[in-house]
Image (cartoon, rainbow, N blue to C red):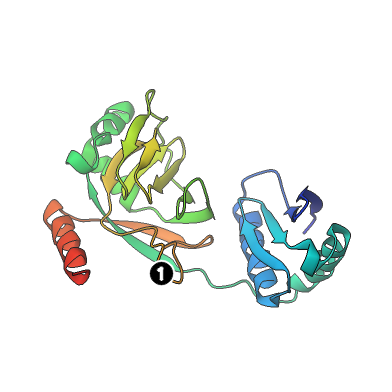
Amino acid sequence: MDYTMFPLSEYAVTIRFSTKVDEAVNDYVHRVAAFLEQQNKDGIFDIVPTFSSVTVYYDPLVAGSCEEICEWLRTELERVEQVKAPPSRTVVIPVCYGGEFGPDLQEVARFHGITEEEVISIHSRGSYRVYMIGFAPGFAYLGGLSPEIATPRRSTPRTLVPAGSVGIAGSQTGIYPLATPGGWQIIGRTPLALFRPHDPEPSLLRAGDIVQFRPITEEQYRMWENEHDSSNT
């Protein structure tokens, strides 16, 4: 696949494969990132895949100059063609839709002239690709939202959106891993922790995963919360 390569800073190089959001390109991005991580090259301390590029962060005192890193990357990119893409995982996210957990569900339904139940049905029957992790720790950018429920952001963002809130913004859907300000239309909330800073793998979701949402009742949500609290005592 064609690419361009350029220094992002004095200790980072970006490999760009496209300027468009494309599923095939994103597949290749994850394949490249996984392959480079497997090489365990000394001096490279982070490899970050995005929608259509990979950025490699390195210590120039250990890994070498920018020119040396670029030359190494060109050699490795030729080898990527010879390896298989890593398998993607499917992660099911339970969601309690509407009510206090989804204060914008009614507005999303009104915007499209459908019922709240239809919004839930359309949202929960989709499969969503994790294109990249960013914005906040563990925040996954999910593509694949049906245009039937694609909805603009709120005109006035909230100063605080609870962790676990499931939202819609334009043609994307996502889950707030932490309590932060936000302008997405909130339609539900999951009891799962998307960001677990003390775990070996802090983010529940990885780039390349497939996410499916499963509706649960408020009672099931509360039970899930109580079980989680009990397990920590």
Please state the total of marks drawn on the protein image.
1
In the rendered image, residue 67, in percent from the top left (x then y), is placed at: 88, 59
From the viewer's perspective, is residue 148 above or below residue 97? Answer: above
Quadrant of the drawing holding the C terminus: bottom left
Q: Secondary structure at mark 1?
A: loop
Q: Is residue 126 visible?
A: yes
Q: Residue at x 59, y 54 (%)?
A: 23
**Which of these two is toward me, 167 or 58?**
58
* Residue 98 appears anywhere in the view: no
Q: Residue furthest left?
A: 219
**Left or right placement of residue 9 versus residue 151 in this view:** right
Above or below — where is 186 with respect to 23? above
Quadrant where the N terminus sits is bottom right
Percent from the top left, x then y, of residue 154? 37, 28
Q: Is residue 133 left or right of residue 120?
A: right
CA neighbours of label 1 inside 10 A, class few (<14), some (14 to 19), many (20+): few
Instruction: Give me the residue at 37% from left, 24% from top.
Output: 156
Query: Looking at the rendering, which quadrant does residue 113 occupy?
Result: top left
Query: Where is mark 1, residue-wise?
Result: 199
Q: Which residue is pictured at 38% across the width and 41% down the height?
A: 180
Q: Front-most of 15 and 57?
A: 57
**Which residue lies at the image location 19% right of the left edge and 59% below the top edge?**
225
Dot 1 amino acid type: Asp
Coordinates of residue 218 in the picture (x, y in percent): 14, 52
Q: Quadrant of residue 148?
A: top left
Is residue 97 toward the left or the right of residue 48 in the image?
Answer: left
**Toward the viewer: 10 or 115?**
10
In percent of width and height, residue 220 lies at: 15, 59
